[in-house]
Image: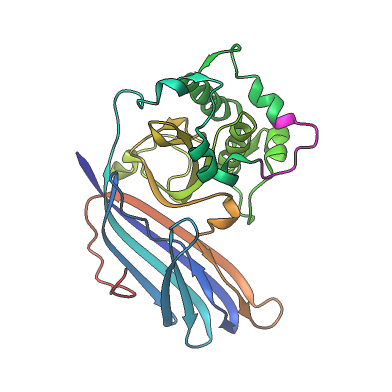
């Protein structure tokens, strides 16, 4: 059965004086899939802008905004209404040849997976790889158990710390600190699994916490903001979602917006402005993910929205 959800993502940039805005790139619109159906997508922009849609190299929907006039505030509000179809129940039926680790991807899979198999971040002493190998129980290990153990190892062994700074910690830094944000944890697990021969990709999106519907507190980290996790390619099962921040695997709480090779390619809103030094005074981001339909009356940014 489908779960109807509404995502409201509001970002406000404030300036002391009017500034000119350069082109902004936004990744806020999910792709339809067998497990995620986009019912409606609307965006409110202030000041007004010309909007151009495109698909990036990964097939994600990207909006490019060219703004009409200077302003002391830039407002971007995205409202999504979607149906999330959960794949709950038994563990995914992976190919028998991949049930035990180590296994080897087929030649075709390796050619198509390409750089998603390769380490992307510096680790001169192989510390991340050594840490990952510590989860391998024996010469032949159950693949799904290994993945679940690493996912749980980050969830239980690292401290979640919200961080206002832009960017993502290097996996080695997260390993040394023992703390980070959801983006940091996702990247650490991605690199750890790549060191073991798995293909992984980064996922940016939202996290639905049912407890928030009743103003309760379930302890889920990442709700109320954009969220990040990863996917691992398993022959037979395809891309399987892992959220090391919350210890989730293939959960219907995860609302996928974009998939990329590296977190730097999945920034929800990016752009520039020109104005006097010190003009920027702050940014506020509010994300709400609730069950049910939206009563929003704003107009779509284009017929493609």
Give me the residue at 37% from left, 64% from top: 78
Q: Position of residue 174 (x, y in %)?
A: 68, 38
Q: Position of residue 53 (x, y in %)?
A: 41, 71
In the figure, 160 relative to 129: above or below?
below
Residue 266 relative to residue 60: left or right:
right
Q: Which residue lies furthest to the right in this view?
A: 125
**Between residues 97 and 29, which one lies in front from this camera angle?**
97
Characterize the magenta stretch by its predominant secondary structure: loop
Give the left or right position of residue 121, taking residue 257 as reference: right
Is residue 125 within the magenta segment?
yes
The C terminus - image quarter: bottom left
Looking at the image, the residue that sits furthest to the top is: 138
Farthest left residue in view: 1
The picture places residue 263, in percent across and down from the top left corner, at: 58, 51
Q: Which residue is drawn at 42% across and 82% down?
A: 50
Residue displayed at 54% across by 20% down: 101
Q: How many labels does the image show?
A: 0
The quarter in which the N terminus is drawn is top left
Residue furthest to the bottom in view is: 69
User: Is 87 covered by the magenta stretch?
Assistant: no
Q: Within the image, what quadrant is residue 121 found in? A: top right
Image: 151 above or below 64: above
User: Residue shown at 75%/42% (left/top)?
Assistant: 122
Residue 163 position in % (x across, y down): 61, 49
Q: Which picture quadrant has residue 49?
A: bottom left
Report the magenta residues as a range.
119-128
Colour pattern of the rendering: rainbow
């Amino acid at each position: 059965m489908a779960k109807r959800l509404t995502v409201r993502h509001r970002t406000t940039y404030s300036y002391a004086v009017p500034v000119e805005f350069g082109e902004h790139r936004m990744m806020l619109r999910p792709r339809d899939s067998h497990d995620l159906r986009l019912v409606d997508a609307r965006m409110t922009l202030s000041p007004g802008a010309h909007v151009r849609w495109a698909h990036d190299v990964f097939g994600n929907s990207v909006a490019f905004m060219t703004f009409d006039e200077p302003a002391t505030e830039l407002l971007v509000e995205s409202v999504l209404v979607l149906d999330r179809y959960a794949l709950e129940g038994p563990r995914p039926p992976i190919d028998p040849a991949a049930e035990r680790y180590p296994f080897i991807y087929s030649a075709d899979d390796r050619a198509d997976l390409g750089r998603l198999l390769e380490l992307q971040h510096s680790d001169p002493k192989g510390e991340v790889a050594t840490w990952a190998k510590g989860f391998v129980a024996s010469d032949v290990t159950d693949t799904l158990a290994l993945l679940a153990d690493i996912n749980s190892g980050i969830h239980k062994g690292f401290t979640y710390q919200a961080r206002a700074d832009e960017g993502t910690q290097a996996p080695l830094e997260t390993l040394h600190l023992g703390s980070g944000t959801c983006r940091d944890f996702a990247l650490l697990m991605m690199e750890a699994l790549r060191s073991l021969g798995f293909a992984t990709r980064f996922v940016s999106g939202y996290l639905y916490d049912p407890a928030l519907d009743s103003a309760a507190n379930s302890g889920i980290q990442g709700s109320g903001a954009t969220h990040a996790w990863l996917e691992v390619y398993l022959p037979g099962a395809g891309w399987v979602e892992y959220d090391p921040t919350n210890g989730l695997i293939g959960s219907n709480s995860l609302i996928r917006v974009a998939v990329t090779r590296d977190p730097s390619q999945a920034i929800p809103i990016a752009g520039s402005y020109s104005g006097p030094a010190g003009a920027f005074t702050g940014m506020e981001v509010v994300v709400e993910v609730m069950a049910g339909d939206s009563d929003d009356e704003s107009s779509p940014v284009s017929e493609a929205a």
